[in-house]
Image: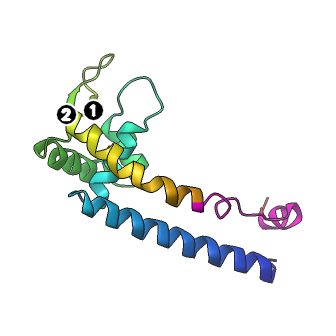
Amino acid sequence: MLTRSDYISLSDFRYQLARFLGFSERASRAAGITPTQYLLLLHIRGHAAGAAPGVGELAQRLQASPHGTTALIERCRKAGLVDKRPGAHDRRRAEVLLTARGRRLVERVAARHRPQLTQLHDVFRLRIPAEAARRSVRP
């Protein structure tokens, strides 16, 4: 069972998360792109693997359908933010890359997020006692 302190922590976490998302949306729009376009650019720029991300990977990161992600990629391609190319190892797989313009844009918007991330440092480290965590896990 959660304690009063747990509910306060969860409430504060959700509040701070909503504030951050609102800030991020405003920062994206101020740069002339939609929040979803910014997220696509961010996930391309922040892709951890060696190769450029594919549509499926980006859809997963965006929590969107591959079809919707393909449409978003196409809108960003038309805006000069991304390029698509056949995969280096599998030509059936399309890789998505940032253009120079897309890279500059995502870097500018992401840099505006630095103070917000610093503020959220402690908020995103919820302290749930081990006993409470064990009780919430069902076998």
x%, y% of residue 32?
20, 58
Q: Residue furthest top?
A: 89
Kindly state the secondary structure of the residue where label 2 is placed.
strand
**Residue underneath mark 1:** 97
Q: What segment is highlighted magenta in the picture?
A: 119-136
* Picture quadrant of residue 4: bottom right
Sequence-first tag of 2 and 1: 2
Q: Residue at x 28, y 30 (%)?
A: 95
Quarter placement of the N terminus: bottom right
x%, y% of residue 9?
70, 74
Q: Would you say 22 lies left or right of 18 here?
A: left
Q: Residue furthest right?
A: 131
Image: 100 above or below 106: above
Q: Residue at x 81, y 80 (%)?
A: 3
Q: Report if residue 99 is visible in the image.
A: no
Q: Are marks 2 and 1 in contact (CB under 8 Å)?
A: yes
Q: Residue at x 33, y 61 (%)?
A: 27
Quarter placement of the C terminus: bottom right
**Residue underneath mark 2:** 83
Tell me if residue 29 is in the magenta stretch: no
Dot 1 amino acid type: Leu
Relative to the observer, which residue lies in front, 56 or 128?
128
